[in-house]
Image (spheres, rainbow, N blue to C red):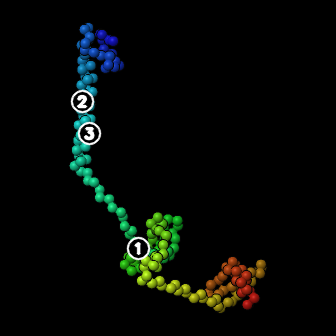
Amino acid sequence: MLEKGWNPRLSEDKLSKDFIDSHPTESNFKFLLDKVKHSEKQSMNDTFDYAQQKWKESHKVPNFKKLEDSYVGPFVIVSLHGTNAVQVELGGELENKHPTIPVILMKTYQPADKELFPLRNTTPLTVPPVEQIEDKTIMKATKEGILRVKIKEKILSDIEIQYMKMNGWDNQR
């Protein structure tokens, strides 16, 4: 134990007021350390009490409830926009809404049970008729023997012509 003198790196545990020959600077230093330690604890407690009081005044317990679905479907998917969005066909009162919906909000369609909902009517699907290709005119023959064909103001590509040859169109010329 240090009886005389003052060392700034001296821990407060080794300082004591009970020493007979202690230096006045040592006892003042111990008093200063005790005062700082006490005021630090007091200010931390005051800050904690103030924050806890303000929290109790302003905090309200939230009333949690389940979120409802924002749209009721089923909707027809018109097109995909990358891997993150889907464009759907909206009708009725939803026409003013934007038709592009994130994929994460989509759910797979589960058809309704006919026993539970006997009054629901299913509308038959109508398939538009397929147009027949007409007005076939040969525009030119290339060196490879692939023909450029013009059908209804549209010039067909080589792949379309090869497809038509495989289906027997070449024999109908």
Amino acid at pointer 2: Ser
* Percent x, y of residue 126: 52, 86
Amino acid at pointer 1: Val
Residue 48, numbered circle: 3
Could you tell me how many numbered marks the image carries? 3
* Percent x, y of residue 30: 27, 19
For disc 2, the marked residue is 39
Q: Along the horizontal axis of the image, is 34 left or right of 161?
A: left
Q: Along the horizontal axis of the image, is 101 left or right of 10?
A: right
Of pointers 2 and 1, the one earlier in the residue sequence:
2
Q: Is residue 87 above or below residue 50?
A: below
For disc 1, the marked residue is 72
* Percent x, y of residue 66: 36, 63
Q: Along the horizontal axis of the image, is 72 left or right of 40?
A: right
Q: Secondary structure at mark 2?
A: helix
Q: Is residue 56 visible?
A: yes
Q: CA distance from mark 3 to mark 1?
A: 49 Å
Q: CA distance from mark 2 to mark 1?
A: 63 Å
- At 52% from the left edge and 67% from the top edge, which residue is drawn? 82
**In front here: 48 or 7?**
48
Residue 55, numbered circle: none
Q: Quadrant of residue 133?
A: bottom right
- At 39% from the left edge and 74% from the top edge, which residue is drawn? 97
Q: Quadrant of residue 9?
A: top left
* Percent x, y of residue 59: 26, 51
